Structures are given as structure tokens and as C-alpha cells.
Image (spheres, grey):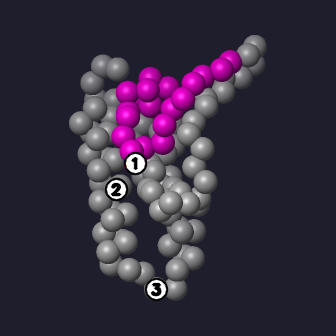
Amino acid sequence: MAILQKLDHPNIVKYLETYNDYKYIYLVMEYIKGSNLIRYLSSYNQHNEQRTCSIMRDIVSAIAHCHAQGVIHRDIKPENIMVDSSNKVKLLDFGLSKTTKGV
């Protein structure tokens, strides 16, 4: 939670709030209506070089922001990258991430 709170970037899923009860902790995250990167890419028969470049630019931008904040994601894979209905790319699932600096 502390890691996600410090990451504010358009290509990183937003952490909104935390709720807990006697047994569980609930993290409220931004809702992303879309699909993961594999499903998104497999839905197209022909890949466009410009769109691929845009996707990679967004992913690298999110990773660069993480690294600038001292966060290492450690689980970047197509299943942890979402493409929403407006074709915006979002990096998510920071469960294995670590910090290189004090949070």
C-alpha cells in the first residue's frame, strides 16, 4: 500500500483507499474496463507498428517513473499490463514490488 500511494502516473493503476475488518484488508483500486495485454493483442489479426510503439512507450514511462521513485516492480508480464476501453495502458499488480529507498 505504501508503495502504491507514492506512485502517481497516468500509466500506473491508482490506489484509492483501504478498508479493513476483523479478518481482511480491502484495497480499493481504480477500475480498468478492458483486458490484459495478451488478450488485447490477440484480438487483432494485424499489428500496427505505431500502436505497438505507443504501448511500449507507455510501459517504459511507467517503469521509469517507478524507478525514479525507488520502486522495483519485479513482476512485469503481459498479465500485469491492462489496456482499457480507451486504449490507455496501465501497469498493475505491485504485490512483489520492493523499494530501493525508504518509503
Q: Secondary structure at mark 1?
A: loop
Q: Is residue 100 above or below residue 43?
A: above
At a point 36% along the width and 40% down the height, the residue shown is 9
Mark 1, residue position: 11
Residue type, label 1: Asn
Q: Residue furthest top?
A: 22
Q: Position of residue 18 (x, y in %)?
A: 60, 22
Residue 72 is tagged as: none
Disc 1/disc 3 C-alpha distance (Å): 24 Å
Q: Residues within 10 Å of mark 3 (few under 14, many from 20)?
A: few
Nearest to N terminus: mark 1 or mark 3: 1
User: Quadrant of the rendered structure where residue 49 is?
Assistant: bottom left
Residue 58 is tagged as: 2
Instruction: Provide the residue span drawn in magenta.
Output: 1-20
Disc 3/disc 2 C-alpha distance (Å): 20 Å
From the viewer's side, name the closer residue of 99 and 36. Answer: 36
Q: Position of residue 35 (x, y in %)?
A: 58, 60
Can residue 96 be seen in this snapshot? no
